[in-house]
Amino acid sequence: MGLMQSRRQFLTTLLLGAAGLLRSLPSLADIQYVTSASGAPVAAAVADGTIDFSLNYAGPNIIAIEAGLPIVTLAGVHVGCFELFGHEGVRSIADLKGRSVGVQAIGSSQHVYLATMLAYIGFDPGRDVIWVTSASPKPSELFADGKVDAFLGFAPEPQDLRARHIGHVVVNSAVDRPWSQYFCCMMIGNREFVRKYPAATKRVLRAILKAADLCATQPQPAARRIVDGGFTPRYDYAVETLNELPYDKWREYDPEDTMRFYALRLHEAGLIKSTPQKIIVEGTDLRAFNELKRELKA
């Protein structure tokens, strides 16, 4: 599998690359890194067994669970993936009304996340903003060229925009409430795999959580490992990301709270009809996570 990941997978590769330091699994030769776009495509790939486990933003996972896809949420891993950038005239989410916003695709993590932000302040995501989707040029390039008014960035895009002094941050989900109070990236697994192989599932989850601890406590060695492994070319962006994101929150935050919060937001946005409790009952299995919270004490 190709190891040079897209921007949309940068945070996932930070954790997976760091997990290689831990030797939690008996043989790293058993691991394949499968490339995939974020959001709905990741949930679909886990559901059909192309991928056994992945990190993915909670929103597309919830949409997939309501649609009956056989995925299960196993854990919350970290907070703060996204930063909303704007040009002049965009100083708040409310300023997006009637303006153009660049995202990778409808159904992508960026689209779903910003839709929940819009719904949270009473906007209709389908009518109150102009969604601009583009594979080439990328939405970040459209924003840099002034062709869209706003852009929801995902590491390392915010680091790159700041380095180039392009636009300004409107919302940083790592620090701005309520977004900073909930997981963004959550660990999901194929339901049948999780059911048949609970011990293997727990070992994978242990490696990811220990990698999150490593990212929080030793960002420089973790970043060097990631670059040396070919997961990303920019050591400076990797270190900056690891220093900025709160990788140490997985012991404090409750994954069910995150599922409940985003299920409510997605309902407000008209993207799901199910109640939060139905989503939690049908699409979560936190047994291994809760065991590991006790076993992997800080």
Image (cartoon, rainbow, N blue to C red):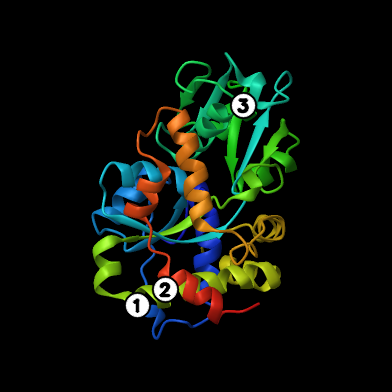
Find disc 2 in the rendering and name its residue. 204
Which quarter of the picture shows residue 253? bottom right
As drawn, is 37 to the left or to the right of 92?
Answer: left
Q: CA distance from mark 1 to mark 2?
A: 6 Å
Find disc 3 in the rendering and name its residue. 150
Given residues 197 and 274, the one toward you in this image is: 274
Query: Where does the image place residue 31, in percent across and percent down from the top left?
Result: 37, 73
Find disc 1 in the rendering and name its residue. 200
Given residues 2 and 265, the one toward you in this image is: 265
Query: Above or below — where is 25 with respect to 289?
Result: below
Residue 184 seen: yes
As drawn, is 245 to the left or to the right of 1?
Answer: right
Query: Above or below — where is 168 with respect to 254?
Result: above
Q: Amino acid at mark 2?
A: Val
Return the disc, 1 or 3, that comes first in the chain's sequence.
Answer: 3
Element assignment for label 1: helix
Check disc 3: other Cα within 10 Å, few if <14, some if 14-19, many if 20+: many
Check disc 1: other Cα within 10 Å, few if <14, some if 14-19, many if 20+: few
Q: Amino acid at mark 3?
A: Ala
Q: CA distance from mark 1 to mark 3?
A: 42 Å
